[in-house]
Amino acid sequence: MTTAREVLWGLAGSALAEWDTVAPLLRARTLRKGEFLFHVGEVRPCIFIVTKGWVKMVYETTEGGAWVKAFAGEGTCFASLVALAPGGVTSFSTQAVVESRVEQLDFAQVRRLAARHLEWQRAVSRAFEVYGLRKEKREMELLTLSAEERYQRFLDEHPDLAPLLAQRDIASYIRVTPVALSRIRARMRGRRRAS
């Protein structure tokens, strides 16, 4: 199991100043499979670090549907950026894919530390950089790849996650219906048998 300290120190590239005062402020939560960490519209000005398991982040539609925005596995740091702004609330929900452990730290505390210490500034900067790279890659895939290419890329990049998910979650993530995903899988199986 990964620790929040390992993740945050890794982002900083060094030990973090005042860690002894920060460690007691971390709040750990174990989530059962299917349990929500938070729902859309909640006040959660925190950064979250997955120390065990997998969580999925879901945008909800006004019609009652949902689209999987992203997955976060062990060693991943994430936040609802909208919720980090003063008066902001979460723009998506987060739910455990399997039993998971997540630690959270109030972003105001992180901001105060970053104002005093270069290594905390590096950690925050690197976290936003990693987030931006993931977001750009996701946008590129959605806008330039076919549904089948998106599915294959998901399988290639997440071989350990794919077997844990319901097919509807994979379909939602690659932005197709479950029926369309079934057709894609059938075509791919057919090609493998033919070769």
Image: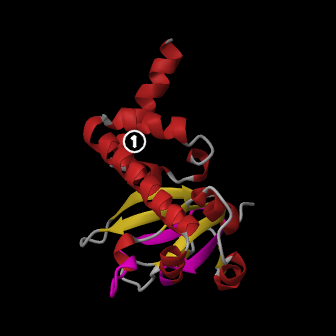
Is 89 situated left or right of 160 in this image?
Answer: left
What element does badge 1 sit on?
A: helix
Say if the magenta span includes residue 180: no
Q: Quadrant of residue 9?
A: bottom right
Q: Position of residue 84 (x, y in %)?
A: 40, 78
Local packing at callout 1 (Cα closer than 10 Å; few below 14, some 14-19, many 20+) is many
Is 44 situated left or right of 30 in this image?
Answer: left
From which residue to which does the magenta span run? 84-108
Q: Residue at x 52, y 69 (%)?
A: 95
Q: Residue at x 40, y 58 (%)?
A: 68
**Residue under numbered circle 1:** 181
Q: Residue at x 39, y 38 (%)?
A: 150
**Height in image: 38 above or below 72?**
below
Camera-side residue: 65 or 118? 118
Q: Position of residue 182 (x, y in %)?
A: 42, 40
Outermost residue toward the right in this view: 1
Q: Amino acid at mark 1?
A: Leu
**Height in image: 128 above or below 42?**
above
